[in-house]
Image (cartoon, rainbow, N blue to C red):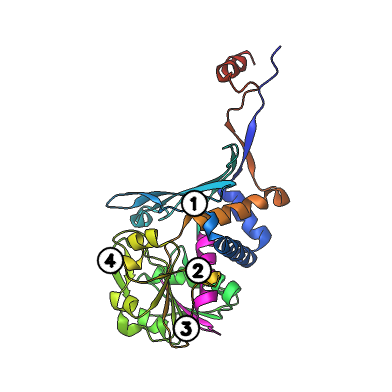
Amino acid sequence: MNTPSKHAYVPFVSVDNMMRLVHRIGIERMLCDLAAEIEADFLRWPDFDKTPRVASHSDIGVIELMPTSDGETYGFKYVNGHPSNTKQGLQTVTAFGLLADVATGYPLMLSEMTILTALRTAATSAMAARWLAPEGASVMALIGNGAQAEFQALAFKAVCGIKEVRLYDIDPAATRKCVRNLAGSGLVVTPCRSAEEAILNAQIITTCTADKQFATILTDNMVGSGVHINAVGGDCPGKTELHRDILLRSSIFVEYPPQTRIEGEIQQLASDHPVAELWEVITGRAAGRSSPTQTTLFDSVGFAVEDFSALRYVHRRLKEFGLYQDLDMIADPDDPRDLYGMILRAAKG
């Protein structure tokens, strides 16, 4: 007599449970944890398979897959970027991700990553700034006050000790939203009428705009020496935020050059323009900030290892909080050679 087929359930972290996890841990604590997790994986950067993300571009957006593996665990993220979505009341970016066991190929966890991507992007920005920003930086200009803005502000507060954020967006409603959401955060929040006003007295400048075009959010004359620029918005071919002259006088740091040269600010430069990889700074193989007058630029486009780190962090905390559902998504018959028999027995049940 055949025994009932067993099931390999896969934990699924829904949007609702991800929000619950953020509240249970605390958003600033979680941002600090993610920054530490990502930094730990940058310290072992050579362990990872690395490839530029697989992108399907259209005139209105992009759909991408971002895979990596450290030889024991495999991870990927599905993510889109459609700036015009907001006109339809939709998110510009949505995402989900998966971890799998390399030894068996079986999934370990499926998770929403729209919220988690915002958290890991901000955590990566702040982690990089800890290595590159001027010592004692306390004021950040935040240009682009959309979906990423509050996460960036809170990450820089929690990880880097920023005390004031100066906000500007071409849409005043976005700035008002950001001011409202950051009320009670402990930050001094200053709305500004122009990018130039926002940059006044800022030691860190974060740009996170969404339009898919070659844009000039910062011109060369706007950026003084000694600042750190965290360029988040340029993340696909044909989309930039900084004037080329800023790049030419900055020390540029990137995640993975083969991807950043296609998608980042440095797509404006020659293919052999020198850049430093962030993992080399963290491991001591390359210099980070070496002078108070040096202008540093983190040309952030987002890389699969950061998603891997974030997914693994969530996976590790599943049992602690129990904030997941079991999905019956892997057919796993008692006899691995009898998948059809599993279907027949289901009819009798």
Residue at left offset 59%, top offset 18%: 338
Q: Can residue 180 be seen at all in this image of the molecule?
A: no
Crowding around mark 4 (Cα neighbors within 10 Å: few <14, some 14 to 19, many 20+) is: some
Choose the circle earlier in sequence order: 3 or 1: 1
Specify the segment rendered in magenta: 118-143
Choose the circle earlier in sequence order: 3 or 2: 3
Choose the circle earlier in sequence order: 1 or 2: 1
Pointers 3 and 4 in contact (C-beta within 8 Å):
no
Indicate left or right for 266 with 95 as reference. Answer: left
Q: CA distance from mark 1 to mark 2?
A: 17 Å
Residue 133 in magenta? Answer: yes
Residue 255: image tag? none
Indicate left or right for 265 with 303 as reference. Answer: left
Whole-percent x, y for residue 80 in the image: 40, 51
Crowding around mark 1 (Cα neighbors within 10 Å: few <14, some 14 to 19, many 20+) is: some
Q: Can residue 253 be seen at all in this image of the molecule?
A: yes
Q: Secondary structure at mark 1?
A: loop
Residue 56 in magenta? Answer: no
The residue singled out by tag 3 in the image is: 203
Q: Amino acid at mark 1?
A: Asp
Q: Secondary structure at mark 3?
A: loop
Name the quadrant containing residue 34: bottom right
Whole-percent x, y for residue 213 in the image: 28, 63
Residue 280: image tag? 2
Whole-percent x, y for residue 215 in the image: 29, 69
The residue singled out by tag 1 in the image is: 49
Q: Amino acid at mark 4?
A: Phe
Q: Amino acid at mark 3?
A: Gln
The residue singled out by tag 4 in the image is: 214
Q: CA distance from mark 3 to mark 2?
A: 24 Å
